[in-house]
Image (tube, coloured by chain):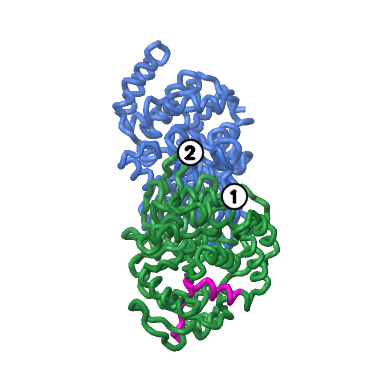
Chain colours: A blue, B green
Amino acid sequence: MFPHYHAVIMAGGSGTRLWPLSRRRHPKHLLALLESSTLFQSTVARLQGMFPTARVWVVTVEEQVRQIKQQAPAIPAENYLPEPAPRGTASVVGLAAIALKHRDPHAVMAVLPSDHFIRHTRLFHRLLEAAYLVAQEGFLVTLGIKPTYPATGYGYIQRGEPLGVYADMKAYHVRRFKEKPDPVTARKMLAAGGHSWNSGMFVWRVDVILAEIRRQMPDLHAALERIDAAWDTPQRQAVIEEVWPGLQTETVDYGVMEGAEKVAVIPAQGLGWSDVGSWEALFDVLPTDEDGNILRGGQHISIDARDNLVFVQNGRLQKLVAVLGVENVVVVDTEDALLVCSRDQAQRVKEIVKRLQDEGREAYL
Amino acid sequence: MFPHYHAVIMAGGSGTRLWPLSRRRHPKHLLALLESSTLFQSTVARLQGMFPTARVWVVTVEEQVRQIKQQAPAIPAENYLPEPAPRGTASVVGLAAIALKHRDPHAVMAVLPSDHFIRHTRLFHRLLEAAYLVAQEGFLVTLGIKPTYPATGYGYIQRGEPLGVYADMKAYHVRRFKEKPDPVTARKMLAAGGHSWNSGMFVWRVDVILAEIRRQMPDLHAALERIDAAWDTPQRQAVIEEVWPGLQTETVDYGVMEGAEKVAVIPAQGLGWSDVGSWEALFDVLPTDEDGNILRGGQHISIDARDNLVFVQNGRLQKLVAVLGVENVVVVDTEDALLVCSRDQAQRVKEIVKRLQDEGREAYL
């Protein structure tokens, strides 16, 4: 339909807030957390009918390449772009832009996280259509989520003047792009209205994003130019590995979007989106029983227990979990680790991972 | 010191309120719940210096005999009295009385549960001394515990007139023995004062208890007479196995103590006693960390978690348990089952076991 349209899946994260299920060797996007397929596989499947696999790209870290390829064998091998080490999404976007430029100088790229949930695929496709059309006009386009509480973990996008209607979807100029605000600012923006959360899904022309990187992140751009020059030579991978360690770790949100000149937003209402950003977030996505519990994996007995999440990763045994008289508790049981956490503290699970790192307890990471 | 004094350990229970650690094949008294030794082993060890092992007896059910013997090899084989099946403590006491009578017609027996905790062994010995002296006067003697809340799971003993001082301990006539009262009655007795909880530890002469059984439980007594007649013949075990299935299941508390004529109580203040009757009871016995948590087994990380019990039975792996932001929760993790329970509902763990039984989920029992 759009022969210049490419999808770039970012699949290099870890997801420490989903510990102990999410681990270094089993990162979040490679877990079958919500369905029988992994989040990454669902992300790939969601592109069917919109992008042929020849135009689906995957950026990941080298240690995950093998696992990732096994999960999506239809994607051509040359569309996998391994980073030597994670350096944030700005360099991911830059690397993908170079690769796409060599395939198709007119490429438009949709940058998509690999570890989100989207309920309504048809609406998602329409949004991507609309974003493509807006991106053709030189905008950096972001899909905006309607905020439901004063979250401090998301970027906020303030809408400006209407830009027009594209594929039946309204697009707006962006007045301000504010990444991860403090609580007071978050509350103010929520109260003021006219803001969307940044979904982490972006659409732009390759030439436009490279120009913005050049303007705002000259060091990254210089590194990308070296990679660009070596792209069609046998030295491509050697150059990537040489320049990569010197890159500053930066997100595309801070590094590019906050300071970008020509940004548009398409509000993506009713998409059924979740970043599955914590155990608590599963309550937005998974069905509950009549007592409000989510009981997944293993066998269960629940007596006077309400609004709990119990997630069991079965090892050799079919584990029985009994919950009695507890409310709003998250229980995640794996073979070698067990998390018991109150739902309202679920964001803090990363503190456990931090402590394990600090104490060098590698086996549990 | 008292050559007619025998200790009879009752070791046939199951302890369903300590599921999932306590299981059919690993009953409560055979668990190393509090110390490196099992509750049964601690019960045996507690008798040292008071009873030579030749005068320590163990009544248990046949399926536990092998395990029990391995845990206390010093007790002579002929002192193990296996029941063909559990029929309550009244028949346990009756069987032991017959066995003791044949060893020593003047025997005084101390009946002791195998699954309780007692902190102060020296005081325990003094109480047993005192009880022996009172029992010699023909009383059924019980050790009374000072009640701390209107429990409905214990028997209540109302003290009557003082009986005297024995081995420095005060003994009293018992006015009333009320087994497991309803909540209103329990509150009244607690408010009235002058009551003790029944510890389940009894001391009496063999001839006295047999006379009381004859008077109050004639069917049991008739069965015991048949066993008595066969005791020194090759038919002993065959007769036990023949009469046992016909016995009514009854506790010594209901069957004998409530209606007994000559009962004495010795208040056992400061004994540091616990029946370890539920996970909650472990807070009376085990030390807590500075946040009030008991963290046993495995490895732990605790962040803003208070007053929880985490009990991990390690299998092949050293399991890590992380508790975050929860309070007053009991977590018990075994290889094939996990309990998450609020502390104030810990008594209801037996309901989980009941449901497993009803649903025929034998593997978890």
Q: Looking at the image, is mark 1 or mark 2 nearer the viewer?
A: 1
Label 1, label 2: how far apart the Cα atoms are: 31 Å
Q: In the rendered image, which residue does mark 2 sit on?
A: A28
Label 2: which secondary element: helix
Return the mark for residue B364. Answer: 1
Task: Give the side of residue B13 with respect to residue B124, left or right.
Answer: right
**Viewed as shown, does residue A166 lie left or right of A210?**
right
Q: Position of residue B161 (x, y in %)?
A: 44, 88
Identity of the residue drawn at 57% across and 79% down: B258
User: Which one is nearer the viewer's eye here, B59 or A233?
Assistant: B59
- Dot 1 amino acid type: Tyr
**Can you give x and y, in whole percent of width and height, for residue B114 in the image?**
48, 61
Q: Position of residue A120 (x, y in %)?
A: 62, 43
Residue B40, can we see it? yes
| Residue A63 quadrant | top left
Between B34 and B271, the one nearer to me in the picture: B271
Q: Is residue A265 visible?
A: no
Q: Are marks 1 and 2 in contact (CB under 8 Å)?
A: no
Chain letter of disc 2 in the image: A
